[in-house]
Amino acid sequence: PSSAPVPRLQNDSWGKQYSHALFKAMSHMLCIGYGQQAPEGMTDVWLTMLSMIVGATCYAMFIGHATALIQSLDSSRRQYQEKYKQVEQYMSFHKLPGDTRQRIHEYYEHRYQGKMFDEENILGELSEPLKEEIINFNCRNLVANMPLFANADPNFVTAMLTKLRFEVFQPGDFIIREGTVGKKMYFIQHGVVSILTKGNKETKLSDGSYFGEICLLTRGRRTASVRADTYCRLYSLSVDNFNEVLEEYPMMRRAFETVAMDRLDRIGEE
């Protein structure tokens, strides 16, 4: 017994002993192997197998949680990428021409800017005061640039903003075509549009302007075409929401009518 070899860790400090034990346990669990030495007895065999099973389970859980954590760091970008992959597959399935695919790609880049949110669902879950606060903040540049909203009742401004829908148009797009039935009017947040009349005269409108209200007031057909000259970030208002808001604020209806009559007079002079 006295001449039997003494294990090399038997007389070492407890720090070294625990460090070596931890290393062996991790070699079982993370490397999914049996470590530095093969098990000898049946007890060692079964304990080693149990250790490897526990290790494989912990390793899989670790990888799963790490992947979920990385994905959750920028879930909106991942959602955009997944959505655009579907768009690419759709374009490929229908064999769309290259220039159309490029325009679709540019539209998605300008419309979502690499991130996608379910904004309607998010706002729908909030209380009305919070929803109105967010919408007023998001549309602050539109309100600041639009003379119509400058001296208007804040309640009217909020009522309008909560019913607006964000839209993006590319250069050359016809936002409105003359002779069609109008169902929307538009507010320009950023961009330049041209109003094209029968006399081939162009009138430019830019940030803070609005158009399309004539048709909503007269319930007739479009009196002119409107073309986007640049990338345009607009807010649209449907005819039903337009009338709903103006029923509560008849003074603002007269403001819209004044601008509409002025524009009709200009069109009639051409």
Image (cartoon, rainbow, N blue to C red):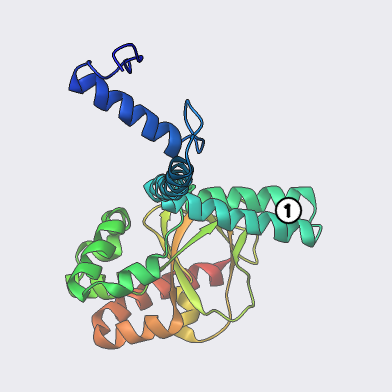
Can you give x and y, in whole percent of width and height, for residue 192 in the image? 49, 51
* Rendered position, 36 above or below 238: above
Residue 170, can we see it? Answer: no
* Rendered position, 38 above or below 136: above
Q: Residue at x 25, y 58 (%)?
A: 137
Element carrying mark 1:
helix
> Quadrant of the image for the C terminus?
bottom right
Q: Quadrant of residue 186?
A: bottom left
Q: Residue at x 30, y 53 (%)?
A: 141
Q: Nearer the viewer, residue 252 or 188?
A: 188
Residue furthest to the front in view is 1
Q: Nearer the viewer, residue 7 or 151?
A: 7
Can you give x and y, in whole percent of width and height, for residue 158 in the image? 24, 71
* Rendered position, 238 above or below 189: below
Q: Is residue 96 left or right of residue 196?
A: right
Q: Nearer the viewer, residue 45 or 186?
A: 45
Residue 207, can we see it? Answer: yes
**Kind of residue at badge 1:** Thr
Q: Which residue is mark 1?
A: 100
Q: Residues within 10 Å of mark 1 (few under 14, many from 20)?
A: few
